[in-house]
Image (cartoon, helix red, strand yellow):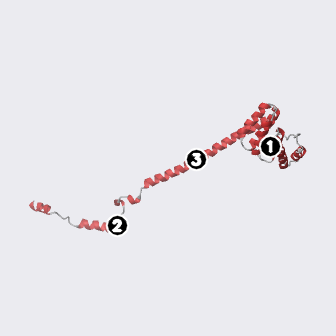
Amino acid sequence: MNLDDGILHCRDARPICAFLNERRCNNAYKAQNFAEAQSEYNKANALKPTFNGLFNEANALFQQNKYKEASELNMAALGQAKTNKEKAIASYNLGNSFYKSQEYNKAIDAYKQSLRLDPSDLDAKKNLTKAIEKKKQQSQQDQKQQQEQKDKKDDKQSQADQKENQKNDSGDPSQQDSDQEPKSQEDQKSQKDQAGKPKSLTRQEAENMLAS
């Protein structure tokens, strides 16, 4: 049975035969009262952790969308697994937990581990393909975001460079030469008066003119 995003459900909870609250745990899970089921499984695991208990608690957490916690319990269940079948289904569920946490690299590794233990598991093959596709999409999205950030940084630097160039080209108006400033009417009158006055000669220049 498929979930909304195409990934398959985790493997079903397994009976816990060693505990008196077995019926309460499993009935709550079957009734989809996953919070109560997780609480009961947790009590059993606190007394004595077993593969079934950890596996079931991880499932109950997964059904509550608590994927990080489910990943931790699935890894703990793997540590308690004794047969290849138990290791395979725990690896499969671990892959699902990683997938839902968008940790696609870890999900891929978990599905591959499950398939090494049980090559006939078609669900694991489908989920592995889905995880690889998601990883590719995630990588493309990351590259796009990195390029957009780089483009924004380059645009800001380009604008700063343009402003600096404009400032250098215009220069400081206060430092411009005075002869580039427009002349006032008084300056023009003074130049005209000076042009109409005879040039004054020194004494030596006058004597030279008389001698000639």
Q: Quadrant of residue 177?
A: bottom left
Identity, as a three-letter code, of the amino acid under mark 3: Asp
Q: Which residue is mark 2?
A: 184
Residue named by callout 1: 58
Label 3 element class: helix
In the rendered view, tell whether residue 50 sits above or below residue 162.
above
Amino acid residing under circle 1: Ala
Quick check: marks 3 and 2 in contact, CB under 8 Å?
A: no
Mark 2, Cα crowd under 10 Å, few <14 / some 14-19 / many 20+, is few
Query: Which amino acid, by three-letter code, is at mark 2?
Result: Ser
Determine which quarter of the picture holds residue 15.
Answer: top right
Residue behind mark 3: 151
Q: Position of residue 52 (x, y in %)?
A: 84, 39
- The mark closer to the camera, 1 or 2, is 1
Mark 3–mark 2 distance (CA, rounded to whole Å):
52 Å
Count of marks placed on residues: 3
Crowd class of label 3 (few under 14; some 14 to 19; many from 20; radius 10 Å): few
Q: Quadrant of the C terminus?
A: bottom left
Earlier residue among tags 3 and 2: 3
Q: Do tag 1 and tag 3 residues touch (Cβ < 8 Å)?
A: no
Q: Secondary structure at mark 2?
A: loop
Question: Is 116 situated above or below 137?
Answer: above
Q: Nearer the viewer, residue 103 or 160?
A: 103
Viewer-closest of 212 and 97: 97
Residue 23 at what x, y percent from top left? 90, 44
Q: Residue 205 location, x and y as percent? A: 14, 61
User: Sequence order check: which comes first, mark 1 or mark 3?
Assistant: 1
